[in-house]
């Protein structure tokens, strides 16, 4: 009789594990379906195609470059470019490969979150955390970017899971890969390093040594290669952004905290989840809370010139997971049952999704409309109207460079160091970009119309050397010489920002 009790208990545990597995599978299926919907509605962002061009050139034997023969480190995610290169070798479209990889990484993140939190909180809150991430609009919208976002988030969660299990060498490798995925990986390595050091001080011998050795073994070879191949391991794009005017505190606050009611609620929920995690002595929750604050301050201090949508998901990951912990714990206390609390949290989050996701889909569809009506046609135009040796000066170099396969003179200086040095010597001159074009004399110029750019160029010597050939604009406008300054329209409606007039260099002496 005594032997039957443990057998019965084991059966109960096995049944509970089986139900959790079924619930996790359903969460993954829901996440998969929603990501397919968002990918179908959206299009990769322009910056993703910069990485794609590096990967394709590497696969085609031209080296790790953007422009063939020009060794410039203009990509901030070398690891993602290296991952994509084999797909280019096999002829798989890189935008499809990047989107597919993003979905795979996202689904793995759900599994890792479940495994990360169940030891601290049990099965129900761990499943809620996986559900929140699978259904959150922030992670769903990112699935259509085609960027390295999901890879970075995967490495973030994987490193925390490895740390929780005391696998320091593996954690050091993953942290090193995060550094090669995004510059913010340095920040993640710092957070993990502080946690490892605290464990070392508490008596876990060799924790710091093993993790540091693995981290350096992963990152140092790349930095040595980058120094020898490019002349510097620091991406030229980062150096260029240092010359540009940074975001304001208001823009930072609006982007990371006040962007909408859903994000504000996430911050409140994350604060509750952080406190709950501390009371449960959950190191992973503490790490996510520290990461959220450190990441926030990183962008406040760094002040990049703009905030792309792909900057938010690593912050949203921490907020979403901590909010799941907070919601499940509070509702479990109110309903006096972890299972009922988890179900209530899941139900409330799904209700919020019913309101939020349609609006997010509208934004995704607009992103696709811009790509289909402006960026892709402009890239096709250059591929058919220009010659292989022609040089194109443009600011948005992703789609255009990838599709046209022409040499690009980057107006933003991300892959053209000459632009950076030219601008650095003329910081006080608002028309430095006009002087640069007149000096370099590219064959074509794709000139953005917004932000008074059209007026400045029209009133300079630029029309003397260049004549308009085509216009690409979201509303289908084709006039090549606008009669008035279009910047007034852009001030009223941001949709018109995707507007370019293509100029060709005039023939003659």
Image: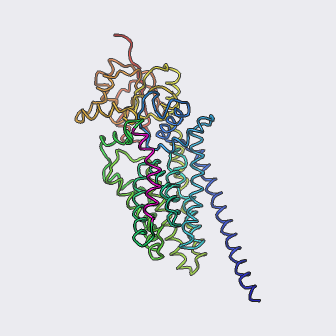
As displayed, is residue 337 above or below residue 445?
below
State the extent of the magenta-drawn residues as a range. Answer: 206-227
Question: Is 194 drawn above or below residue 35 in the view shown?
Answer: below
The secondary structure making up most of the magenta span is: helix
| Residue 123, horizontal then vertical, whole percent | 60, 71
From the viewer's side, name the closer residue of 78 and 507.
78
Residue 384 lies in the magenta stretch: no
222 magenta-colored: yes
Q: Residue furthest bottom?
A: 1
Kindly give the residue lying farthest to the right in the view shown: 1
Percent position of residue 60, x then y: 55, 30
Relative to 208, is 150 on the left or the right? right
In the figure, residue 108 lies in which quadrant? bottom right
Q: Say which residue appears at 46% left-offset and 63% top-offset.
A: 266
Count the marks: 0
Where residue 25 appears, as percent x and y from the top left, is 66, 61
Query: Is residue 354 at all visible to an observer of this figure?
Result: no
Choose top left, top right, bottom left or bottom right for residue 95: top right
Pinpoint residue 30: horizontal percent, then vertical percent: 63, 57
Residue 106 in the figure: left or right of residue 437:
right
- Looking at the picture, the colour scheme in use is rainbow
């Amino acid at each position: 009789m005594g032997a039957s009790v443990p057998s019965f208990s084991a059966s109960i545990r096995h049944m509970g594990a089986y139900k959790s597995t079924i619930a996790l599978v359903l969460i993954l299926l829901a996440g998969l379906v929603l990501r397919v919907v968002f990918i179908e509605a959206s299009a990769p962002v322009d910056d993703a195609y910069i990485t794609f061009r590096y990967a394709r050139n590497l696969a085609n034997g031209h080296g790790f470059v953007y422009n063939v023969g020009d060794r410039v480190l203009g990509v901030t995610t070398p690891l993602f470019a290296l991952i994509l290169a084999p797909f280019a070798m096999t002829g798989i479209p890189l935008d499809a490969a990047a989107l597919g990889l993003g979905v795979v990484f996202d689904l793995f993140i759900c599994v890792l979150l479940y495994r990360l939190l169940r030891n601290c909180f049990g099965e129900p809150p761990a499943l809620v955390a996986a559900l929140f991430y699978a259904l959150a609009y922030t992670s769903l919208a990112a699935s259509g970017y085609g960027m390295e976002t999901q890879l970075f988030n995967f490495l973030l969660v994987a490193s925390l899971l490895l740390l929780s299990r005391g696998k320091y060498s593996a954690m050091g490798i993953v942290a090193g890969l995060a550094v090669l995925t995004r510059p913010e990986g340095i920040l993640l390595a710092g957070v993990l390093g502080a946690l490892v050091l605290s464990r070392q001080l508490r008596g876990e011998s060799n924790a710091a040594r093993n993790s540091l050795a693995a981290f350096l073994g992963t990152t140092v070879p790349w930095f040595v290669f980058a120094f020898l191949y490019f002349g510097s391991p620091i991406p030229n794009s980062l150096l260029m952004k240092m010359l540009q005017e940074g975001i304001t505190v208001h823009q930072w606050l609006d982007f990371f905290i006040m962007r909408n009611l859903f994000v504000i609620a996430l911050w409140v929920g994350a604060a509750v989840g952080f406190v709950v995690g501390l009371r449960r002595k959950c190191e992973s929750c503490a790490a996510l809370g520290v990461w959220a604050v450190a990441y926030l301050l990183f962008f406040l201090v760094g002040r990049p010139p703009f905030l792309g949508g792909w900057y938010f998901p690593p912050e949203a990951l921490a907020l979403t997971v901590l909010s799941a912990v907070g919601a499940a714990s509070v509702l479990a206390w109110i309903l006096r049952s972890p299972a009922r609390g988890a179900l209530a949290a899941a139900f409330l989050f799904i209700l919020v999704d019913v309101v939020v996701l349609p609006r997010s889909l509208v934004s995704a569809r607009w992103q696709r409309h811009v790509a289909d009506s402006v960026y892709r046609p402009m890239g096709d135009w250059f591929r058919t109207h220009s010659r292989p040796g022609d040089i194109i000066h443009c600011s948005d170099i992703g789609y255009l460079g990838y599709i046209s396969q022409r040499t690009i003179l980057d107006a933003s200086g991300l892959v053209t160091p000459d632009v950076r040095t030219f601008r650095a010597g003329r910081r006080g001159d608002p028309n430095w970009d006009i002087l640069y074009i007149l000096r370099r004399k590219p064959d074509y110029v794709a000139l953005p119309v917004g932000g008074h750019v059209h007026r400045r160029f029209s009133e300079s010597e630029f029309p003397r050397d260049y004549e308009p050939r085509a216009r690409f604009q979201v509303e289908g406008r084709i006039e090549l010489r606008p009669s008035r300054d279009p910047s007034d329209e852009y001030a009223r409606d941001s949709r018109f920002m995707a507007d370019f007039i293509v100029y060709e260099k005039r023939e003659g002496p």
